[in-house]
Amino acid sequence: DLVVFFTFWFLKGFPLLDGVCAGLDFKSQIATGLVFVGIIGFGSSILDLPWDIYQTFVLEESFGFNKTTMATFVKDRLKGLALALVFGVPLMSVVFWFFITVGANAW
């Protein structure tokens, strides 16, 4: 994860993604920020998915800890996504609102 983060950073991926999100012409900076964070979160989830599958179905299975089926795994992922949307979007909206409103004095 750290290697991917720094690679994305040094290849100027954050400014590029910011430009893409800003180019979507949302009327609100909060919406643009939410899309930015959503894309980063989605990308992170996709990159972590093979390792999570390996950990659940190979590693845990080899020690006899795994009681998870593929259907349960998918349901858990969807529930996690729903919780991230229900709690994460309002929370991040408040954080973005705070920084937009307070500006440079936020720090």
Image: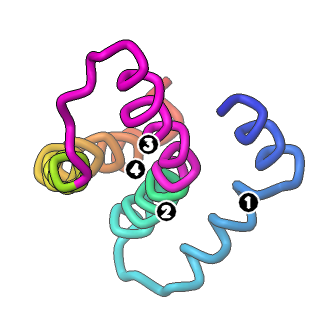
Is 100 placed above or below 59 here?
below
Q: Main secondary structure of the magenta part?
A: helix
Point 56% across, 75% down: residue:
22
Q: Which residue is mark 4?
A: 100
Q: Nearer the viewer, mark 3 or mark 4?
A: 3
Q: Which residue is mark 2?
A: 39
Point 59% across, 84% down: residue:
23
Q: Which residue is mark 3?
A: 53
Q: Nearer the viewer, mark 2 or mark 1?
A: 2
Q: Nearer the viewer, mark 4 or mark 2?
A: 2
Q: Which residue is mark 1?
A: 15
Q: Which amino acid does the dot numbered 1 rest on?
A: Pro
- For marks 3 and 2, the one nearer the N-term is 2
Decide if residue 25 is on the left or right side of residue 14.
left
SS type, badge 3: helix
SS type, badge 2: helix
- For marks 3 and 4, the one nearer the N-term is 3
Q: Which amino acid does the dot numbered 3 rest on?
A: Ile
Q: Which residues are magenta?
A: 44-70
Q: Could you tell me residue 78's position as x and y percent?
A: 20, 56
Which residue is nearer to you in this view: 62 or 44? 62
Q: Quadrant of the N terminus?
A: top right
- Here the colouring is rainbow
Point 16% across, 47% down: residue:
72
The answer to the question of whether label 1 and label 3 lie on touching residues, with beta carbons closer than 8 A, is no
SS type, badge 4: helix
Q: Is residue 66 magenta?
A: yes
Q: Which amino acid does the dot numbered 4 rest on?
A: Ile
Q: Nearer the viewer, mark 1 or mark 4?
A: 1
